Image (cartoon, rainbow, N blue to C red):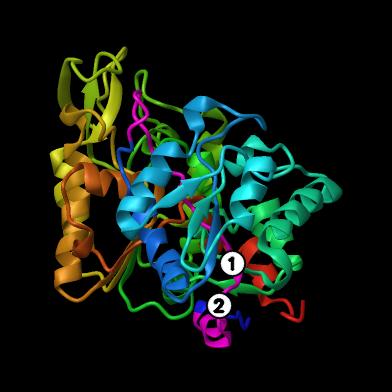
């Protein structure tokens, strides 16, 4: 699928034009509204910078969190605008609305090199509407902000799996291009699906098996090793007949896990020991037990040291690794050792020449929270769910539309 690139747009000239950029600026905030991981802002800045430096007036649209189609002060993009301005080294205006009077007035006042961030696009219920006409009406309002010679750059890979107004419908109304971030993500994920160097290992974690079933089904027949940790591991342990205490368990997925273990016994690797706690809290009492010896009333919150050692040994010979999902509750220091151990094992293979991809979301947040440099991995995706759906082989509407004729 041939997709026009940012370079193609810059070659046509953008000075004096307004370019609408869909970025993924959905960063985590603490209880006080402070950004705890600016990774997505940092990753989004290069495309915006290139356009501004080439003389475009840049309008950025993005979402934060999951507002219910109406303004929510706690999910305003104000802290994002400030951090993006720091990253770009230039002022970033923030409109007080999405496509209302303030957004329109600010858009009309843009001069070459100016950057305007619209307020949280999901404050408008049309953004995520299932009704094509509603989404199109919002898309048309966004297009109006760009004037008569506008263009659209899709640079939010984390949302390209969504058929939403600012991702999909806008691309049908404006000349459209893939930003550098989207272009790079597609290149990286293509390496994981088309002809990966072997041995090829996938490391999955996170809480729910159901969230990862698609990618397990898609990748298990293709990889040499599939390491499973995190909360999802306990459903697999239950499928082996082990008691899991009060650990996270999806009972309706036990039979599914039994089937996966039967079909892919030579590929799947599960924890052999776990760190259990008497409650879900940072100060919980904890101890390490064998994976088949979890006491009643205790919950597993991390993989144990022997599991880390075994997983590291399996991963050490890999030439390609994809990792999505932490191995434990890394937000609590007492239960972060498993995730850190896995991350360090993957980082070590990078130094040995392996191609390693951290699959966005909580995995990326964990890497940064645990103080492991981004440079220790070949690529840290901003994709999360989009990365998984790409690897599953699903159609991503926000990518598909970019491959359509650009004769708008």
Tell me which corner region of the image, top left, top right, bottom left or bottom right, holds residue 17. Answer: bottom right
Q: Residues within 10 Å of mark 2 (few under 14, many from 20)?
A: many
Tags 2 and 1 touching, CB below 8 Å:
yes
Horizontal side of residue 361 vs 276, given as left or right: right
In the displayed structure, would residue 7 be above or below residue 17? below
How many numbered marks are there? 2
In magenta stretch: residue 227: no
Horizontal side of residue 199 vs 181, given as left or right: left
Q: Residues within 10 Å of mark 1 (few under 14, many from 20)?
A: many
Q: Main secondary structure of the magenta part?
A: loop
- Residue 390 location, x and y as percent? 54, 63
Task: Using the rendered image of the protein, determine whether residue 226 is visible from the camera's viewpoint.
Answer: no
Q: Residue at (20%, 31%) from the top-left corner?
A: 335
On the image, numbered disc 2 is attached to which residue? Answer: 14
In the displayed structure, would residue 402 be above or below residue 270? below
As helix, strand or loop, the secondary structure at mark 1 comes to strand
Disc 2 or 1, which lies upstream in sequence? 2
- Residue 389 location, x and y as percent? 56, 57
Distance CA(mark 2)–CA(mark 1): 8 Å
Query: Which stretch did the figure color magenta?
Result: 7-34
In the displayed structure, would residue 78 be above or below residue 7? above
Horizontal side of residue 298 vs 192, given as left or right: left
Image quadrant holding the N terminus, namely bottom right
Tell me which corner region of the image, top left, top right, bottom left or bottom right, holds residue 22. Answer: bottom right
In front of the other: 325 or 13: 13
On the image, numbered disc 1 is attached to which residue? Answer: 19
Task: Using the rendered image of the protein, determine whether residue 201 is visible from the camera's viewpoint.
Answer: yes
Image quadrant holding the C terminus, namely bottom right
In magenta stretch: residue 19: yes
As helix, strand or loop, the secondary structure at mark 2 comes to loop
């Amino acid at each position: 699928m041939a997709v026009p690139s940012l370079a193609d747009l810059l070659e046509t000239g953008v000075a004096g034009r307004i370019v609408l950029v869909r970025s993924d600026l959905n960063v985590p905030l603490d209880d006080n509204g402070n950004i705890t991981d600016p990774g997505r802002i940092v990753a989004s800045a290069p495309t915006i910078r290139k356009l501004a430096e080439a003389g475009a007036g840049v309008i950025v649209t993005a979402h934060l969190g999951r507002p219910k189609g109406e303004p929510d002060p706690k999910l305003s993009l104000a802290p994002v605008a400030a951090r993006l301005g720091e990253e770009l080294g230039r002022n970033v205006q923030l409109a007080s609305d999405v496509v209302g009077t303030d957004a329109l007035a600010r858009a009309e006042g843009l001069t070459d090199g100016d950057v305007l961030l619209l307020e949280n696009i999901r404050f408008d219920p049309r953004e995520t509407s299932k009704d094509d006409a509603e989404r199109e009406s919002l898309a048309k309002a966004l297009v109006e902000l760009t004037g008569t010679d506008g263009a659209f750059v899709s640079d939010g890979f984390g949302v390209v799996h969504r058929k939403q107004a600012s991702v999909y419908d806008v691309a049908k109304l404006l000349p459209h291009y893939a930003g550098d971030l989207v272009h790079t993500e597609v290149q990286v994920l293509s390496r994981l699906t088309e002809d990966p160097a072997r041995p090829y290992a996938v490391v999955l974690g996170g809480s729910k098996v159901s969230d990862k079933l698609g990618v397990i089904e898609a990748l298990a027949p293709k990889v040499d090793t599939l390491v499973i940790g995190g909360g999802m591991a306990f459903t697999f342990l239950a499928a082996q007949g082990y008691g899991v205490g009060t650990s996270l368990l999806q009972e309706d997925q036990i039979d599914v896990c039994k089937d996966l273990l039967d079909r892919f016994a030579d590929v799947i690797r599960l924890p052999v020991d776990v760190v259990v706690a008497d409650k879900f809290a940072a100060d919980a009492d904890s101890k390490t037990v064998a994976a088949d010896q979890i006491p009643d009333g205790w919950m597993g919150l991390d993989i144990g040291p022997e599991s880390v050692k075994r997983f590291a040994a399996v991963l050490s010979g890999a030439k390609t690794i994809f990792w999505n999902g932490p191995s434990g509750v890394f937000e609590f220091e007492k239960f972060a050792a498993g995730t850190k151990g896995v991350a360090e094992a993957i980082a070590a293979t990078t130094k040995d020449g392996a191609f390693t991809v951290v699959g966005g979301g909580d995995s990326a947040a964990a890497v940064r929270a645990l103080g492991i440099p981004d440079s220790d991995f070949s690529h840290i995706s901003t994709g999360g769910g989009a990365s998984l759906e790409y690897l599953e082989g699903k159609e991503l509407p926000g990518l598909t539309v970019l491959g359509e004729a650009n004769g708008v």
